[in-house]
Amino acid sequence: MNYQETIDWMFNQLPMYQKIGAQAYKKDLTNTLALAKHLNFPETKFRSIHVAGTNGKGSSSSMIASILQEAGYKVGLYTSPHLKDFRERIKINGIEISKEFVINFISTNKIFFEENQLSFFEMTVGLAFEYFAQLQVDVAIIEVGLGGRLDSTNIITPLVSVITNIGFDHVAILGNSYQEIAFEKAGIIKPNVPVVIGQYNNETKPVFISKANETQSKIIFASELDLPEVTSDLKGNYQQFNKKTVQATIQVLRKHFKISEENEVNGFRNVVKNTNLQGRWQVLSKSPLIVADTAHNKDGLEIVMNQITEQDFNKLLFVFGVVNDKDLAEILPLLPLNAKYFIAKPDVPRGLEASDLGKKMEKFDLNFEVFDSIPLALEKAKLEANSDDMIYIGGSTFVVAEIL
């Protein structure tokens, strides 16, 4: 198989959360452990940092990678989902895994995958771990796919575990209380491995403390530390929380790596350059102001909507779409009434039909027009926008993926 055929095989034959949602989620690590054994335990051959959380884990993982790269290390970075190409998920020093490595890994192990009915995510985690082991990275930052306790990435023993925050997302899988979701995320805390907690509330803090006591892990609450302000090229207001989480994590990592203050400062300033992270308050144009952001749940969107109000614009236009498992009763009240919405279904099976989204939006008095696709919606928004207007593109990772 060539690269495209290989990727199509991975996407189509096997369960994939990015496309179909909750039914792709496996409730134990049996397959992942079997795969690790089959590959001769690649996850034991490199040092790692494990990052979980409802929001901010991708940004935080990329910031940590950027700082370690500035310190001169060979740094693996595993994140999900991808925006344009599958290979974005697996990088070393910002460079994506080669097509050849992906093809060879799948063809070499295809019979094992089929016999054991591995999911898309399980295969991808195995691919990332094998790549980082073979190319001998100094350290890899591993972002959790979903939850933590039962996530395929949770076979590593990292130098430090990081939990950015707890919010409501994927409640059908992870539970619909803060305690239940915190319990799943806290599943990445390992015996005698320190854990950094970004944000917490009265319901989640006891869950984290209980788990850390059980594993005899040092627990660090980043939000309680007195840390200096740092500047980053990631300009979303929500990054203020991620920056503190990363600063606290770097303090822990200095026991294992030589990281100067200059490395840290430069790492924060050069996240996009070092890791090619996209879709985080990404300014695509200044006249009119066009911003794309992957925020897609209540906690993320609330901060982004506030940031929009801080911008200077005449008219506000939204290119907007969502997937079908979102709690619109939580999201739609956050949206500004003074905007015009150009809505469409994101181009994935999980995408919510624009007509269904429109029916819900009517109840909140939002002014919208329905389009056949996200690119068409953006085209129309650009035609209507003047140079002093603002276009915001978001609602789902997949909306942003279609316009980048």
Image (cartoon, rainbow, N blue to C red):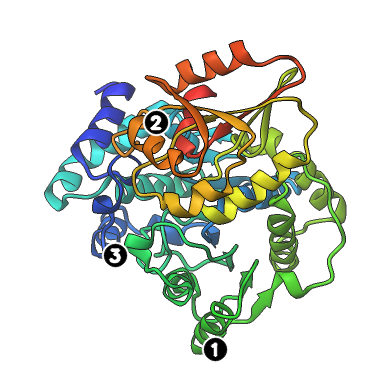
Q: Does 388 sit left or right of 100 as displayed?
A: right
Residue depicted at x 22% and y 50%: 118
The percent coordinates of residue 271 (x first, y second) are 70, 41
Dividing the picture into quadrants, the one containing residue 203 is bottom right
Type of the residue with mark 2: Pro
Residue 61's spot in the image, x, y percent? Answer: 60, 52
Q: Which of marks 1 and 2 is in front?
A: 2
User: In terms of sequence position, does the residue under pointer 2 or pointer 3 come before the other?
Assistant: 3
Q: Which residue is drawn at 70% across and 51% down?
A: 239
> Label 3: which residue?
29
Give the residue pinned by disc 2: 346
Distance between the alpha carbons at the discs numbered 2 and 3: 31 Å
Residue that appears at 60% across and 39% down: 337
The front one of 103 and 205 is 205
Mark 1, secondary structure of its residue: helix
Q: Do the residues labelled 2 and 3 touch (CB within 8 Å)?
A: no
Give the mark nearest the N terminus, 3 or 1: 3
Instruction: Confirm whether residue 76 shows in the render.
Output: yes
Disc 3 marks a residue whose amino acid type is Leu
Read off the residue under disc 1. 213
How far is mark 1 from mark 2, CA to CA?
A: 43 Å
